[in-house]
Image (cartoon, rainbow, N blue to C red):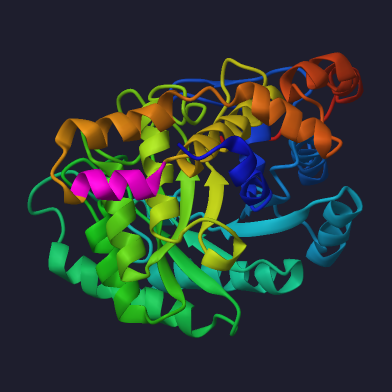
Amino acid sequence: MTTFSAISAQLADQAIEVPSWAYGNSGTRFKVFGSAGTPRTVEEKIADAATVHRFTGLAPLVSLHIPWDLVDDFAALRRHAEDLGIGLGTINSNTFQDDDYKLGALTHTDQRIRQKAIDHHLACIDVMDATGSRDLKIWLAEGTNYPGQGDMRGRQDRLHDSLSTIYDRLGDEQRLVLEYKFFEPAFYHTDVPDWGTSYVQVSALGDKAYVCLDTGHHAPGTNIEFIVAQLLRLGKLGSFDFNSRFYADDDLIVGSADPFQLFRIMVEVIRGGGYGAASGVAFMLDQCHNIEEKIPGQIRSVLNVQEMTARALMLDTVALTKAQEDGDVLGANEIFMDAFYTDVRADLAAWREERGLPASPMRAYADSGYQAQINAERVGGTQASWN
């Protein structure tokens, strides 16, 4: 098996975007929970994201959500982030919290409402121009609850027309990434329910449009690593939203429910050329921390991704390929499982110390006093929330 020292340099290529909304309050359909130290402004969210990067060295970008993170001066916000040692990453649109979008946004039958949704995305691209962001990420809470409620074919046609207008506004270095989700809040049919639908839509747009794969947006038992392999093979995997799930879109800490799945995904990412800055594939988190502290939750998540990346990099692909070609079923599986079961935690701790990072970012954060500081300072005002 490949040694840790042999893959040490490759680990330096890892960069994971953290979402601004992970630091705000969130909850269930029934209740949004508050907690001490929650940011009240986007600047405070960025400060928390920068704290994750300071302790891990893994999170150099923070994703923004519009309108949750609207400010008057995005160029100034960009400078604020850079002063804290990070950058502004993906810009996420929102067409699911306006009464006009009850029956659809980019797919709506009413041209006025469709144009309103298109204009929102064009405004998001304006934000990208100011922040230097590369990606516009679109997730649509659109579909129907009852057979006959809407014309499914017509909705796909209108979606294409709307996306085409948005796509045409992108700059030369900007991209559109279209996320999918197999259900919720629409339950009969969802307009972008799977990777195939997303792929069909972005392929019709052009070479600056890609699929975003959220690891929580699949039915139980779905082979996500197969989807990863296919999208990389087709050159259309633009980004990940990493989280973990037991049932549906649980938005749990990545790797918490099924670390083996995260390992399998990372094996396919590396095998398909999707790892590293040159690949163009963005690694992002999409999580809400409802019962755990938010900053430690993000630290734990990026460390989980790093650990499974290290294990995947240590897979002996030469021996695995030979076993596969020889038809050695159990031998191939053993080689695969050996890499997964390799404990790299001590090696990663030493790797971090060599780079001036704490061996245990979780412990270092707990000892830093940052949480107590923000708990004391962030009193009054309105806490950030997606509700």
Q: Position of residue 251 (x, y in %)?
A: 46, 31
Q: Is residue 320 covered in magenta?
A: yes
Above/below status of 24 relative to 239: above
- What is the quadrant of residue 70 in the picture? bottom right
Answer with left or right where residue 381 lies relative to residue 248: right
Residue located 61% across and 62% down the image: 277
Q: Quadrant of the C terminus?
A: top right
Q: Can you give x and y, in whole percent of width and height, for residue 112 in the image? A: 40, 73
User: Can residue 168 be seen in this snapshot?
Assistant: yes
Instruction: Tell me where residue 355 appears, x and y as whole percent.
Output: 82, 40
Residue at the spot 33% in from the left edge and 44% down from the top edge:
319
Magenta range is 316-324
Looking at the picture, how far across and down is residue 94, in whole percent?
Answer: 51, 54
**Residue at image x 21%, y 40%?**
187
Q: Is residue 94 left or right of residue 383?
A: left
> Quick check: is 85 in the magenta stretch?
no
Q: Depth check: 215 or 145 in front?
A: 215
Location of residue 141 with respect to 221 vertically, above or below: below
Image quadrant where one finds the N terminus: top left
Front-most of 112 and 227? Answer: 227
| Numbered circles on residues, count | 0
- Is any atom of residue 97 visible in this view? no
Q: Quadrant of residue 377?
A: top right
Q: Does 65 appear above or below 323?
A: below
Give the quadrant of residue 174: bottom right
Main SS, magenta residues: helix
- Is 170 or 233 nearer to us in this picture? 233
Q: Is residue 329 left or right of residue 283?
A: left
Nearer to the camera, 279 or 51: 279
Q: Is residue 277 above or below residue 147?
A: below
